[in-house]
Structure formats: C-alpha cells, structure tokens
Amino acid sequence: MKTNLSQLLRTLPLVMLGTAIYAFGLQYFVIPNQLMEGGVTGVGILLNYALGWPLSITTLVLNIPLYFLGWKVLGRSHTGYTIFGSVSLSVFLALMEKLISAGWIEPFRTSNDYILAVLYAGVTLGSGLGIVFRYGGTTGGVDIIARIAAKLKGWSMGQFILASDIVVIGLSLLYIPKEKVLYTLVAVFIASKLIDFIQEGAYAAKAFSVVTDHGDEMGKLINQTMDRGVTLYPARGAYSGKNKEVVYCVVARHEIRQLKTIIRSIDPLAFIIITDVHEVLGEGFKEE
C-alpha cells in the first residue's frame, strides 16, 4: 500500500505536467490558428469552431459517459488514471481560457507563417501527451473506446485511434479550409513522433547479435572488460551445417566501438548484427 501511494505521488504530478503542456499547445497554437486535433479533443475543438463552446467544458462532458463505460469494462484502476488525466486537462484548458480572456497570455496567431504554428503545435501536443502516456495516464476519450475494442474484439488500439482521428479531422473540412486540415496532419505526425520518443526514452542503446565459433571466449572477455551481461545461444549454419554460437549483448552507444574491437580481436570473421534498442531496464541500465 505504501509503495502504491509513493508511486502515485511520483506519477500524478508528472501526468499533470503533461496535461498542462498539452492544454497550452491547444489553446496557444492550435485553436488560434484554426488547426485541429483528433479524438474527443478534436470533437471539442469542432464544437468550439462551430458553436463557440469552451473546449474545457466540452471535453469533460464528452468524456463523462466514457468514464462509466471504462469503469465497467476496464476496471477501477485504469479508469481512475483516465479520470484524473482528463479532469486535469479540463482544468488546465479552463485556466488557459481565463488567462487568454484576461489578456495575461496572447495566443500565437499567424496569417502567413503556419509552418511555425504547426511545428510548435506538434511539439507541445506530442510532448504533453508523451509525458502523460509515459507515466500511465491518459486524457480519456477515444483511448477508452480503443482499449475496450482491443479487450472485447481484439482490435488494434493504434489502428482504432488512427481511424477515429481520420474521421474527426475529415469532419473538420466542414468548418475550416482544407489547407488547415493538411497543416493539421503535419502537426499530428510531429506529435506522434514526439509521443513515441518520450515513451521509449531519449536514451538509446545498441543490441549486438554475433554469430561466432568462439562464444565462450568472447563472452568472458566482454564480461571482464566491459562488465556487461552476455547471453549465448546455440546455432547451426544452414549451408555449412556447422554448430556455432550467437553472442547477444546490449551496450550503451558510447561502448559500441569498444565492443566491436573485442569481437574482432577474438574472431575477425564473426558475423555481427547491430540493432537499435530504445529502452533497457535492468542491471547496468535504468531501473523502473
């Protein structure tokens, strides 16, 4: 219980930080330039454009029926995080609305340099959502429906969310010029890349798979010289029929050259495969 409480005290402020950045991006870059967003937030923006309804209220109201559905199908724990994230978003959206209407913040509006607005919209939206998702939160909306569809029907969450975003952004053609929709797609693309980058972590390691006849000797030298763990797999050449070993090791980027040198010093003919690793948990790397 104490562990769960300490985890909540660490993660909830970060979820709030993410929703604050996301709300800032929406109110400072997206809405002033008549851009769009997907999901329930996009529906709220459409209602803002068409009827003038405040985004802070519409996003919260549209999410309320989904809370009950998520609570019933997905359980209390997940829905609790979702409610916290979406309420936090509505609070920061309302705060931004107050600050803008009071003249404390002047939104970024442009009539000729939409690329600048799109770039910063994508960065702020992606950074905010990336932080929210990385620490277990969501902003509600389509995320709840996508999780339910994945659980009950086995549908892909990513494909479901993408399809819903396409529908919502497509509907925006009724209210905003098509060039703004095209600009929006650029912002969504940038945001998706930032979300992936933040979720996977800025730290990137490299994984080495080495096919060799000298697995034991290579593994021991890597252990002794670099203090890195090594896993050995038995293998057999399909053409030669000879038994070999695959040495598998994950290292930080600055250790790549050193590992290559060790491998070549033992087996100059070793076959080396190097792949990107976006996140590593465990001894010698970061811990959860």
Image (spheres, rainbow, N blue to C red):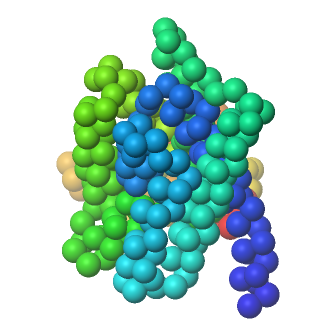
**Place of residue 149 in the rendered image (x, y in percent of width and height, measured from the top left):** 28, 70
Task: Tell me if 7 is positioned left or right of 53 in this view.
Answer: right
Q: Between residue 87 and residue 243, name the one nearer to us.
A: 87
Observer able to see residue 236: no
Residue 284 can be seen in this image: yes
When the figure is inspected, residue 171 is found, relative to residue 156, above or below; the finding is above
Q: Is residue 174 above or below residue 220?
A: above
The N terminus: image quadrant? bottom right
Residue at (54% x, 22% y) in the render = 117
Residue beneath the point at 37% across and 83% down: 73
The residue drawn where x is 47% and y is 56% is 58
- Residue reaching furthest top? 112
Along the line of sight, the residue nearer the viewer: 58 or 79: 58
Q: Quadrant of the C terminus?
A: bottom right
Q: Nearer the viewer, residue 88 or 280?
A: 88
- Decide: is 182 above or below 160: above
x and y percent of residue 244 in the render? 38, 57
Residue extending furthest toward the bottom:
1
Position of residue 251 measured from the top left corner of the image (x, y, whole percent): 63, 48
Find residue 104 and report its horizontal and vertical position in percent: 78, 33
Res 186 → quadrant:
top left
**Does residue 185 sit above or below 237 in this rendering?**
above
